[in-house]
């Protein structure tokens, strides 16, 4: 197999050839056909997350076909097309697993962070955490759904059922969630970097009712706002835009420090909440909703050996939509 491997914090990924991995009991081997590039991959590569296991193969928006099955696997079979998401294993025994909150498991494993991921020609995954994808849709177009879509869905659910929704950061997750929200009859207000006309045009083409810069105040109060950009300074800006009783959802795994802000903009029973990981139920619910809403992803495809270039484009804000690697 071939893989783009991260050997230490802050160094470029290196293309390596390795023996093909062998699935153990309860595992499957997936021949990767596409792997989306997520901002979390950037946090891994830049060393912004703790407890990274080096060397590690990043990537957790994986689409591919099973080509080997370990013992005890009966739900999946060779040839099936599956998606492999960020959450790669949970213990099943801790308080959170026992109370249907496996996204908060005390002993989890994460694809592309604590277990090897999809910036490779093959990976081994826990069969319980693979989503059958069927045969509809193109692999590269589906791959961003495995994290940008899943985390986007969880953040949308946590935002509540309000009819006016702000989206701060209109990248991979934002452009997917906007379509789901629009299909649900919500009004979408898209906030982008100042002057990012391309992202704003994409938002309007996907059904957004208004676009503006992150520091702008929308023309109406928001019932909720979701922040996808990893910028803590957006939290008080979003709080100023939501109504009393409204909610600000921080959807990233990492964010720069939130600056101090006057209590007045939180008062009125406004809430700030965070999203952590996902559950398998999120995946089942979202993939059904995505199919119903006919979600269309905007992707830029890179060969596997150009993973560093794809990450650089994401880091520099040069992507509209999502980057996808093809082995």
Image (spheres, rainbow, N blue to C red):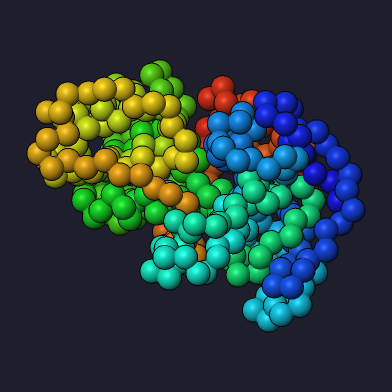
Q: Nearer the viewer, residue 18 or 260?
A: 260
Residue 254 in the image, given as x and y percentages of width and height: 47, 35
Disc count in the image? 0
Residue 68 quadrant: bottom right
* Residue at 43 percent of width and 70 percent of height: 98
* Residue at 80 percent of width and 33 percent of height: 14
Q: Is residue 42 visible?
A: no
Q: Is residue 74 left or right of residue 237?
A: right
Residue 321 in the image, given as x and y percentages of width and height: 52, 37
Q: Is residue 277 visible?
A: yes
Q: Nearer the viewer, residue 46 or 286?
A: 46
Residue 161 quadrant: bottom left
Q: Nearer the viewer, residue 143 or 269?
A: 269
- Picture layout, residue 145 above or below residue 308: below
Residue 224 in the image, given as x and y percentages of width and height: 24, 43
* Residue at 76 percent of width and 34 percent of height: 7
In the displayed image of the protein, which residue is found farthest to the top?
195
Q: Is residue 36 left or right of residue 255?
A: right
- Picture layout, residue 283 above or below residue 3: below
Q: Is residue 3 left or right of residue 310?
A: right
Q: Is residue 217 left or right of residue 146?
A: left
- Picture layout, residue 325 above or below residue 92: above
* Residue at 76 percent of width and 63 percent of height: 29
Residue 306 in the image, given as x and y percentages of width and height: 75, 33
């Amino acid at each position: 197999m071939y893989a783009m491997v991260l050997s230490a914090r802050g160094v470029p990924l290196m293309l390596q050839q390795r023996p093909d991995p062998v699935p153990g009991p309860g595992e499957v081997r997936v021949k990767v056909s596409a792997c989306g590039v997520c901002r979390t991959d950037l946090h891994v590569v830049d060393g912004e997350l703790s407890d990274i296991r080096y060397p590690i193969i990043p990537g957790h928006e994986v689409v591919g076909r099973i080509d080997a099955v370990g013992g005890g696997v009966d739900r999946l079979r060779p040839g099936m097309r599956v998606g492999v998401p960020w959450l790669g294993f949970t213990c099943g025994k801790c308080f959170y697993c026992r109370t249907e909150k496996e996204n908060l498991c005390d002993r989890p494993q994460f694809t592309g962070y604590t277990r090897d991921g999809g910036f490779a020609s093959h990976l081994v995954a826990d069969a319980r955490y693979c989503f059958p994808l069927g045969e509809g849709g193109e692999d590269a177009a589906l791959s961003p759904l495995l994290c940008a879509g899943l985390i986007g869905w969880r953040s949308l659910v946590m935002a509540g059922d309000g009819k006016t929704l702000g989206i701060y950061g209109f990248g991979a997750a934002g452009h997917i969630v906007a379509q789901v929200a629009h299909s649900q009859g919500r009004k979408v207000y898209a906030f982008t970097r100042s002057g990012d006309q391309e992202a704003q045009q994409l938002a309007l083409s996907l059904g957004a009712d208004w676009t503006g810069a992150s520091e702008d105040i929308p023309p109406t109060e928001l019932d909720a706002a979701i922040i996808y950009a990893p910028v803590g300074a957006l939290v008080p800006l979003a709080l100023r835009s939501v109504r009393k009783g409204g909610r600000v959802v921080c959807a990233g795994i990492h964010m720069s420090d939130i600056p101090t802000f006057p209590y007045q903009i939180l008062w009125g029973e406004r809430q700030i909440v965070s999203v952590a990981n996902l559950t398998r139920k999120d995946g089942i619910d979202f993939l059904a909703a995505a199919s119903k809403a006919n979600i269309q992803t905007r992707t830029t495809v890179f060969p596997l050996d150009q993973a560093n270039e794809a990450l650089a484009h994401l880091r520099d804000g040069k992507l509209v939509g999502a980057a996808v690697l093809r082995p």
